[in-house]
């Protein structure tokens, strides 16, 4: 039984037991601004677990796609992924322990076919200070279930995780742990919960890979919550049983069940492998990487794991409407993609990574998630555009880091800012590269990096209109977008009409941009369309936009554009659309501010459109244009 079959059989199993199977929620929470991503199966169900009536009834089941960005640094080992699916079933005041535990045990041992001898479980040991008793009911249910399979249900009291490393397994099958491991509430342990907060003990199920030897670096003895990899949690039933009151803890009038099981982990258990990347929703991606690179998984394990996980996550983020950017969910998506592209260099795969791998990801999920099939072309366009954008600056950024490595120089906050501002490196990627090349990192790097970032933002907010004669009406988002669009159009006019085109003035408001330029005759409809098409092409390419100070004479001699009649000092601020040292679309003297990347001009499907082209004065034409 592969991963896809486990998912579908799980939903069928609980549908047959009266559960309404609901669609997955988006990876970006729609009604929860406190978090960037849906990180667990229960997250979209919280309002209903807290008392709101669910429109589908009191028994719910689903398979929820989840993303946990905090696990990015862990990806590369055999079990961590940023993207995963969580199988879930919920009872909203209906059934409780005596139904939930046998159902999950039946699903694991009968439907999936796992060996009961390899399963171990935990229960809540109770909290004497809070007056919450030990979950003897749960332990008794588990005892009978194991006996039914001929497995001796020895019970061991552990307590804390630290005690686990001291006591070890002691031949146990059922283990009692304290609230640090087997209690759930939004506030953590019982003593941390506010009045009115619900919570309860949970019961976890672990699968044993008995061929893995315990590594004592984690602790003296192995136990089910050990981090050595011998035991892997595959499911957790939370029994929301109590509410905290002024008098202490009392039973909830309606008690809920919240179950979450890792689909990928159950699939790995079925294969009896601790390597998540060998299951059926990840192995085909690895195989495609082997074919693309000519390298083997065994020789390039970490790189292939990182790429497979990160591109799978990026595909689903794109399906759910996220695009790479420098803020919020878009920043995480950009970091995932750029980290994958960087690791692809280790494989020698320096071209068309997304074009080759993203369709493999889509193929794995399109039958079970129709939205993947419906959005596949759009998803591929988003990912390919980001890859093209980053590859333009990746080489130069790596050269800069290699130069620092050869100089045996500490990586400073200024270095990291330059790599971010000029080469598009998320600061985390710069740190990872420094670690991999044994480049020391200055202790105060973050302080200096943040200072430079804040200074740049302040310059963008307070900079004068620079070379633009009419100036900017303000520094609102739309005016800044029109300002950047003017740069794209200026370069397009030079390309279409000729190098005689020189800026003669500009006025930018929130309603439109206006641009005056030297040209002796009226533009033809074909020329106007050619300019529009070229600008929209640059928006779709999503070029990075950055600036740096340069020597004025050298900048002008290198072809940097300026405005007619402007006088400059010895140093000027030069804005580049693209890579200042490599492939770029335009380089222009300007005071700013601008967007971070040209794709922002096309947000919400907007396109650049010239409304009017007319005479301004003798030998000067005027264009008015908008983003619509």
Image (cartoon, rainbow, N blue to C red):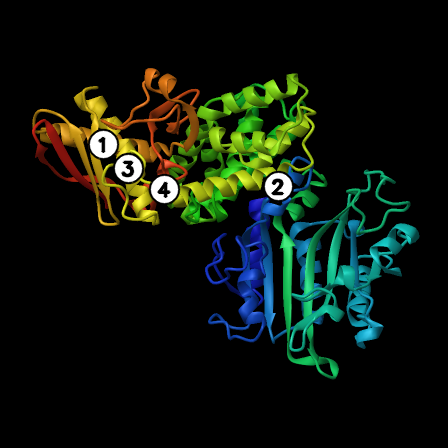
Which numbered mark, 3 or 2, is in the foreground of this view?
2
Provide the secondary structure element on which disc 3 rests.
Answer: helix
Quick one: label 2, few (<14), some, or many (20+) residues within 10 Å? few
Q: Where does residue 482 sit, x and y in percent of width and height?
A: 28, 42
Q: How far apart in space, not on screen, are marks 1 and 3 (Cα)?
A: 13 Å
Which numbered mark, 2 or 4, is in the foreground of this view?
2
- Look at the image and tell me in which quarter the N terminus lies: top right
**Residue at the image point whose x is 68% and y is 29% from the top:** 435
Q: Where does residue 85 sit, x and y in percent of width and height?
A: 57, 50
**Residue at the image point whose x is 66% and y is 35% from the top:** 76
Residue under circle 2? 447
Say which label, 1 or 3, has the lower sequence index.
Answer: 3
Which numbered mark, 1 or 3, is in the foreground of this view?
3
Quick one: label 3, few (<14), some, or many (20+) residues within 10 Å? many
Provide the secondary structure element on which disc 4 rests.
Answer: helix
Q: Where does residue 394 sit, x and y in percent of width and height?
A: 50, 25
Q: Give the label on residue 485, or none.
A: 3
Say which label, 2 or 4, has the lower sequence index.
Answer: 2
Q: How far apart in space, not on screen, are marks 1 and 4 (Cα)?
A: 17 Å
Q: How far apart in space, not on screen, are marks 2 and 4 (Cα)?
A: 28 Å
Q: How far apart in space, not on screen, are marks 3 and 2 (Cα)?
A: 33 Å
Q: Give the label on residue 533, or none.
A: 1
In the depicted structure, whether residue 389 falls above or below residue 94: above
Residue under circle 4? 600
Quick one: label 4, few (<14), some, or many (20+) residues within 10 Å? many
Say which label, 4 or 3, has the lower sequence index.
Answer: 3
């Amino acid at each position: 039984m592969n991963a896809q079959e486990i998912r579908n059989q799980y939903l069928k199993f609980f549908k047959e037991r009266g559960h309404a199977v609901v669609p997955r929620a988006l990876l970006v929470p729609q009604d929860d601004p406190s978090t960037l991503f849906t990180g667990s199966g229960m997250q979209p169900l919280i309002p209903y677990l807290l008392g709101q009536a669910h429109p589908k009834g009191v028994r719910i089941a689903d398979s929820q796609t989840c993303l946990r960005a905090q696990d990015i640094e862990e990806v590369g080992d055999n079990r961590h992924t940023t993207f995963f699916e969580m199988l879930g079933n919920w009872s909203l005041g209906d059934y409780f322990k005596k139904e939930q535990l046998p159902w999950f045990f039946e699903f694991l041992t009968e439907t999936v076919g796992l060996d009961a001898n390899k399963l171990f479980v935990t229960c809540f040991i109770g909290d004497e200070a809070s007056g919450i008793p030990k979950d003897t009911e749960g332990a008794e249910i588990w005892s009978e279930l194991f006996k039914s399979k001929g497995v001796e249900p020895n019970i061991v009291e552990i307590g804390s995780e630290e005690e686990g490393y001291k006591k070890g397994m002691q031949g146990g099958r059922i283990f009692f742990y304290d609230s640090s491991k087997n209690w759930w509430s939004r506030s953590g342990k019982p003593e941390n919960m506010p009045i009115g907060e619900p919570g309860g003990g949970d019961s976890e199920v672990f699968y044993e890979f008995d061929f893995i030897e315990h590594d004592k670096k984690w602790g003296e003895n192995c136990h089910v919550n050990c981090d050595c990899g011998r035991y892997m949690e595959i499911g957790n039933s939370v029994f929301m049983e109590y509410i905290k009151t002024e008098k202490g803890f009392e039973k909830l009038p309606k008690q809920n069940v919240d179950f979450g099981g890792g689909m990928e982990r159950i699939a790995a258990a079925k294969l009896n492998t601790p390597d998540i990347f060998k299951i059926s929703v990840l192995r085909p991606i690895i195989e495609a990487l082997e074919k693309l690179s000519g390298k083997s998984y065994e020789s390039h394990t970490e790189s292939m794991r990182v790429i497979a996980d990160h591109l799978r996550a990026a595909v689903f983020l794109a399906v759910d409407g996220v695009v790479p950017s420098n803020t919020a969910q878009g920043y995480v998506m950009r970091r995932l993609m750029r980290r994958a592209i960087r690791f692809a260099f280790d494989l020698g795969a320096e071209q068309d990574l997304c074009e080759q791998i993203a369709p493999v990801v889509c193929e794995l999920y399109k039958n079970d998630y129709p939205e993947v099939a419906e959005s596949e072309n759009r998803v591929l366009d988003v990912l390919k555009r980001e890859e093209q954008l980053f590859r333009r600056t990746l080489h130069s950024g790596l050269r800069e880091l290699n130069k620092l490595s050869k100089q045996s120089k500490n990586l400073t906050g200024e270095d990291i800012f330059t790599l971010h501002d000029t080469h598009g490196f998320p600061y985390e990627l710069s740190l990872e590269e420094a670690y991999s090349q044994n480049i020391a990192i200055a202790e105060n790097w973050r302080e200096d990096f943040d200072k430079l970032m804040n200074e740049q933002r302040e310059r963008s907010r307070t900079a004068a209109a620079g070379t633009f004669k009419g100036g900017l009406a303000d520094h609102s988002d739309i005016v800044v977008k029109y300002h950047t669009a003017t740069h794209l159009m200026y370069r397009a006019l030079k390309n279409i009409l000729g190098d005689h085109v020189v800026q003669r003035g500009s006025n930018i408001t929130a309603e439109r941009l206006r641009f005056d330029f030297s040209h002796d005759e009226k533009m033809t409809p074909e020329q106007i369309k050619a300019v529009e098409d070229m600008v929209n092409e640059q928006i779709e390419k999503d070029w990075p936009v950055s600036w740096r100070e340069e020597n004025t004479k050298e900048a002008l001699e290198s072809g940097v554009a300026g405005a007619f009649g402007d006088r400059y000092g010895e140093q000027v601020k030069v804005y580049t659309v693209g890579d200042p040292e490599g492939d770029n679309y335009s380089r222009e003297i300007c005071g700013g501010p601008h967007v971070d990347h040209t794709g922002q001009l096309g947000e919400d499907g907007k396109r650049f459109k010239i409304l009017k082209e007319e005479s301004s004065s003798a030998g000067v034409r005027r264009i008015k244009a908008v983003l619509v």
